[in-house]
Amino acid sequence: MAAPRAPVQPPRWRVTFDTGETFVVEGLTLVGRRPEARPGESADRLVPLRSEDMSLSKTHAQFQATPSGALVVLDRGSTNGSVVIRQGVSKALSPGRPATLLAGDKVCFGDRQMTVEPA
């Protein structure tokens, strides 16, 4: 008789910002100059980032892992937008439309950048 299999854990993701801050994503994360959750919204982590050229909105974007383990980013209607760079190709995010990230992707929020890797 075969031993019972352990439940498969969904992948975990580590993000690293160009500021040196790095962490494993757990729950809803908001990034911006002074990010804050909307009324009735619960954010697990707020990541305030300095913006030398003020290209970063107050609450610029959000990201979180889905129950299946995918890492999803969403621009929250920022003034200067967000861009995903995958294998050297840049693609602007449409405000309010989630985009799934892959290992090695870079995301630019205004003048700040984040890299995504499996944890």
Image: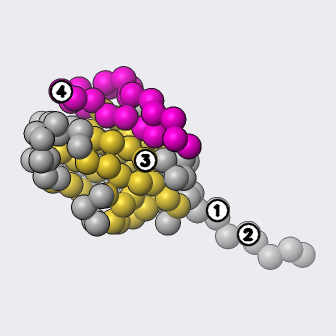
Please tell me whether mark 1 sits on a helix, a strand or a loop: loop
**Towards the viewer: 64 or 7:** 64
Of tags 3 and 1, the one toward the viewer is 3
- Judged from the image, the secondary structure of the residue bearing numbered disc 3 is strand
The first of marks 1 and 4 along the sequence is 1
Q: Is residue 83 left or right of residue 78?
A: right
- What residue did someone put label 4 on? 79
Q: Which residue is mark 3?
A: 106
Q: What residue does disc 2 label?
A: 5
Cα separation, mark 4 vs mark 3, equals 19 Å
50, above or below 59, in the image: below
Amino acid type at mark 4: Thr
Mark 2–mark 3 Cα distance, whole angstroms, equals 35 Å
Pointer 2 local density, CA inside 10 Å: few below 14, some 14–19, many at least 20? few
Residue at x 45% of width, y 33% of height = 90
Report the span colored magenta. 76-97
**Label 3: how many Cα within 10 Å (few below 14, some 14–19, many 20+):** many
Residue at which label 1 appears: 8
The kind of residue on which mark 1 rests is: Val
Amino acid type, residue under disc 2 in the picture: Arg
Compute the Cα span from label 2 to label 4.
48 Å
Q: Is residue 83 magenta?
A: yes
Look at the image and tell me whether residue 45 can be seen. yes
Q: Residue at x 51, y 35 (%)?
A: 89
Residue name at image x 39 percent, y 64 percent = 24
**Label 1 to label 2, Cα distance in Å?**
8 Å
Displayed quadrant of residue 6: bottom right
